[in-house]
Amino acid sequence: MIKRLIVGLSISAACFGASIDNGANLFDGTKSFENGAVACVACHNVNSSAVISGGTLAMDLTSMGGAMEYPLSAVENMSSPVMQEAYKGKPLTKEEIADLDAFVMDAANNPGSAGGDNFVMMGVAGAVIAFIILSLLGNGRKKESVNQELYDRQQVNQTQSSQWRDA
């Protein structure tokens, strides 16, 4: 109980003025970064129901809440050379960093399954609907094989040829 209270107070203090929703939108690219930086979801994942499943190129950020300000504050602080190159000349603002940190901190304290579960289910549902529609459209089509029609014509032609030769 006391541990939860301390965690809750630290979240409230760290996220003062920061928006969890804005952080989620920045993370998944729904909202663009002010300086045109790449969305975090391209390489990272966070287990949150607020965003779709992210990339697997880099580490999962679910447990990084409260530890994002330093690595994101300057390109030279970023641990990955790929990240340094991607964010070169496109620094994040303090507000964007605070919003991302608030979002990741919220995800760490309220883990959910990544929105990718819904994405997969919607894909399966879409495929089933497409199959049903295509099946209904195909109902009026010919049921016989085209090859059968060709075979039957050849049989008729051969019969006529043999009758012609026999006559």
Image (cartoon, helix red, strand yellow):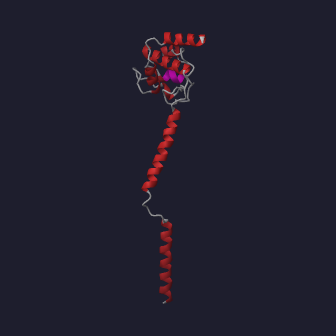
Residue farthest left in this picture? 34
Residue farthest bottom in this picture? 167
Q: Which residues are magenta?
A: 80-85
The N terminus - image quarter? top right
Principal SS element in the magenta part? Answer: helix
Location of residue 128 in the rendering, given as x and y in whole percent from the top left corner: 49, 46
Location of residue 102 in the rendering, given as x and y in whole percent from the top left corner: 49, 17
- Residue that appears at 51% across and 42% down: 124
Q: Is residue 92 visible?
A: no
Q: Is 4 placed left or right of 42 in the picture?
A: right
Residue 83 colored magenta? yes
Q: Is residue 131 visible?
A: yes
- Residue that appears at 52% across and 38% down: 120
- Residue that appears at 46% across and 27% down: 28
Q: Where is 101 relative to 163, above or below?
A: above
- Residue that appears at 49% across and 42% down: 125
Location of residue 123 in the rendering, given as x and y in whole percent from the top left corner: 49, 40
| Foreground pick, 71 / 28 | 28
Location of residue 158 in the rendering, given as x and y in whole percent from the top left corner: 50, 79
| Foreground pick, 89 / 131 | 131
Residue farthest front in this picture? 1
